[in-house]
Amino acid sequence: MKKLADDLKFVNKEINALSKKLEQLSKKAAKLMKAAPKKKAVKKAKATPVKAAPKKKAVKKAKATPVKAAPKKKVAKKIKAAPAKKTVKKKVAKKTAAPKKPAGKPSATPTSKVLTLMKRYKKGIAISKLKERSGLNDKQISNILHRASKEGKIKRVARGVYQLA
C-alpha cells in the first residue's frame, strides 16, 4: 500500500508540473496571436437546403427504323511488310594498348582471392567461410574450386572443405 501511495504522489507531482508548463505555453501562444497580423475572418455560409431542380418534361423521341446492314464484302487482308530497319553506322573505336600492370603484384582476380584465403588455412576451409571472407557468390566459388581442382591446385579434404594441394 505504501508503494502505491508513493507512486500516486509521484504521478500527482508530474501532472502538476505538466499543467504549469501547459499554462505557460498557452500564455505564450496568446501573446503570439495578439502580435500576429489579423486576417479577415472568413464567414462560414449557413447551410441552406438544396432545392431540387425542376423536372423537365419528357420529350417523345421518334423510334428509329432499323436499317438493314449491307452485305459484307469479302476483302483479302493486305499483309503489310515490316518497315525496313535503318542501318546505323557504328563508330569503331581505335584500339589502344591496355596499360601494363606492375610485374610485382598479381591482379586480384576472384581465383587469386580464393587461393590466398586458402593459404591461411592449412587444414582446409569450408565453402561457407570462403563465401563470407571473399565476398563472392556460391556460383563463383564453386566454379573457382572446380577449375582449381582440375588444375591440381587444391584438393578436397571433406564434403565442402578444400585445402591447397
Image (tube, rainbow, N blue to C red):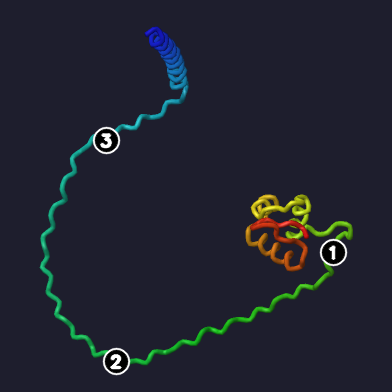
Mark earlier in primary sequence (2, 3): 3
Q: Secondary structure at mark 3?
A: loop
Residue at left 34%, top 92%? Answer: 75
Residue at left 29%, top 92%? Answer: 73
Q: Which residue is mark 1?
A: 99
Instruction: Give left or right: position of 73 versus 131.
Output: left
Mark earlier in primary sequence (3, 1): 3
Q: Which residue is mark 3?
A: 45
Q: Secondary structure at mark 1?
A: loop
Quadrant of residue 151 within the rendered picture:
bottom right
Q: Residues within 10 Å of mark 1 (few under 14, many from 20)?
A: few
Q: Position of residue 162 (x, y in %)?
A: 71, 57
Residue 41 lies, with reference to residue 32, above or below; the image says: below
Q: Nearer the viewer, mark 2 or mark 1?
A: 1
Residue at left 67%, top 51%? Answer: 129
Q: Secondary structure at mark 2?
A: loop
Residue in front for this viewpoint, 3 or 55 = 3
Mark earlier in primary sequence (2, 1): 2
Q: Position of residue 61 (x, y in %)?
A: 13, 70
Residue at left 74%, top 64%? Answer: 148
Amino acid at the residue labelled 2: Lys
